[in-house]
Image (cartoon, rainbow, N blue to C red):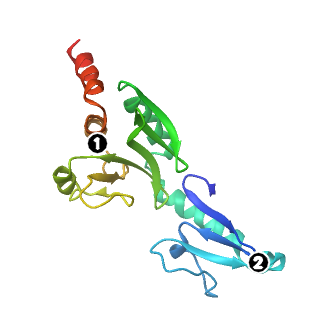
Amino acid sequence: MYRTVGEVCWIQLLKSRCNVYFTRGTELTDSEGELEGTSDRFRFVKVPDESALQRLPLREWIRESVELNAAAVSGALSFDEVLGRLRAIALTLPQTKETLTWGKPHFRVGEKIFCGCGEQHGMASLGLKMPPDESTLLMKVPGVEKAPYSRPNDGWVQIDPAVFDDWDEIERLIVGSFRLIAPMRTVALLDAEGDS
């Protein structure tokens, strides 16, 4: 994976060729129609041999992807800034730790994930769990949507902090997610900290 302020591209190695995938593939200039794929975001190009590296506009696509990512995040918090804020909230909760899961930072209480940091459309995003009825209501607010990995009615949402940027509310939601996931005795530790 190659990334700058957002994911740019990655290479899939196959027996007879490699495919180069572009995260913002649908937005790239492709006058020759060489990019393939049907995703709403990703496109890829087949690279059968070394000569194709010279023929294909890979450098232009990478440069264009980097520029698209930079334009998308101008004024928004970077991935590292969002992760820093998440750490400041999540790691103060009892018995929590940060792990790298599926290539992205996640926060766990015990062995269960209650919050994570990732990227969506080249922008930093965070995921957390809510009661299903509350998540349905919150998903009507700009910047909040059903998490792509969630199952029906499980309450996992994805938040774009460039749009939904009320960090006091985000902190409340992270603590709420922790309360849903943590064992009761760990939640009692949190409550005891609040009482002191």
Q: Quadrant of residue 173?
A: top left
| x, y percent for residue 193 | 27, 17
Q: Residue at x 47, y 59 (%)?
A: 72
72 and 39: which one is in front?
Answer: 39
Q: Quadrant of residue 169?
A: top left
The residue tagged 2 is 16
The answer to whether 95 appears left or right of 38 in the picture is left
The answer to whether 1 appears left or right of 72 in the picture is right
Quarter of the image with the C terminus is top left
As helix, strand or loop, the secondary structure at mark 2 comes to loop
Which disc, if any, is residue 143? none
As helix, strand or loop, the secondary structure at mark 1 comes to loop
113 and 71: which one is in front?
Answer: 113
Q: Residue at x 36, y 52 (%)?
A: 160
Which amino acid type corresponds to the residue marked 1 in the rendered image? Answer: Asp
Quarter of the image with the N terminus is bottom right
The answer to whether 162 appears left or right of 21 in the picture is left
Q: Residue at x 49, y 46 (%)?
A: 78
